[in-house]
Amino acid sequence: MALAFQPLSPHFAAEAGGIDLRRPLNAALAAEIEEAMNKYAVLVWRDQPLDQDQQMEFTRWFGPFQLGFGRIAAGHKKQRFKHETLADMSNVDEDGVVVSRHSRRIYTTIGNMVWHSDSSFQAPAAKFSILTGHTIPSWGGETEFADMRAAYDALPRRAKDDIAGLVTEHWALHSRAVLGDTDYTEEQKRAIPPVRWPLVRIHPGSGRKTLFIGAHAREIVGMTLPEGRLLLLELLEHATQPEFVHRHHWRVGDVVMWDNRCTLHRGKRFDFSEKRELRRSTTEDSASVMDAVA
């Protein structure tokens, strides 16, 4: 069968099908998927129950693996999976038991419920993230995506002129601190220092301008802190209007793939007493370092 893509919204996102992701890819198929990602930015694959090895084998076609926020926790907790670069996006402990809502794992779960781009706080940042669904709660827990290319296109000319050339500083722990998650050692804080990015970037896959914002962005260089944060909030409010957002309703066996360079995403609230197990693999954007600001 041939790859097929069915658009899910006017601006971006498509349901993908036609191949079994559990079988090895080849260079031609990987290139076709990457081309579709450049167009749609989010691809949804249904009924593809990948095991750990299959997920990592699929992911490796799209760039080097990235640890991301896991660098802060590296060496500080027991790994549940056989691959260090496979992130455990769940509310269960190492034995698969639902954790207390006071657990630090719940802090991580809640931290993923604000609009963000994976690893925007480091250079190189993330390219693609691939999330697989294994246990789904009875309600909530959806993942929403927002198209930053369409959001930029829809800005008034005055707004585009105002933000042209601005530089934003991103820090991994800024989004956590806002939620009250501040219990980190100095060693952990130093593990991922802040990084600066242009607020408006060129998406390398499509050549379109895109906003590079989200919860990890803590200030705009050259502006007072309150003025910069207000502008970032205004841009985030604009960019996450319903017309730019696609909501994914999870089923077991789903594989969702997105481009962090031109989308934001967030998880939605669910009952923390119910089990929710997702696994994320992420690739590094080798091109991102080219437009990082020293």
Image (cartoon, rainbow, N blue to C red):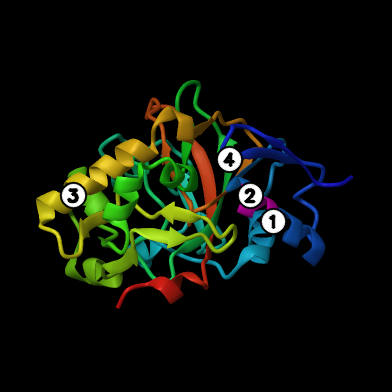
Answer with mark 2 or mark 3, whichever residue precedes in sequence: 2
Q: Residue at label 2? A: 39
- Name the residue carrying label 1: 35
Sequence-earlier tag: 2 or 4:
4
Tell whether 155 sits left or right of 107: right
* Residue type highlighted by circle 2: Lys
Splitting the image into 4 quarters, where does residue 63 fall? bottom right
Q: Which comes before the other along the chain, label 1 or label 3? A: 1
> Type of residue at label 4?
Phe
Residues at marks 2 and 1 touching, judged by CB atoms closer than 8 Å: yes
The amino acid on which the numbered mark 3 sits, given as a three-letter code, is Arg
Q: For this view, does 21 lie left or right of residue 254?
A: right
Residue topped by disc 3: 229
The magenta segment is 34-39
Q: Of the residues under marks 4 and 1, which one precedes in the sequence?
A: 4
The residue located at (65%, 65%) in the rendering is 60
Question: Label 4, on which residue?
Answer: 12
**Amino acid type of disc 1?**
Glu
Taking the image as shown, residue 35 lies to the left or right of residue 180, namely: right
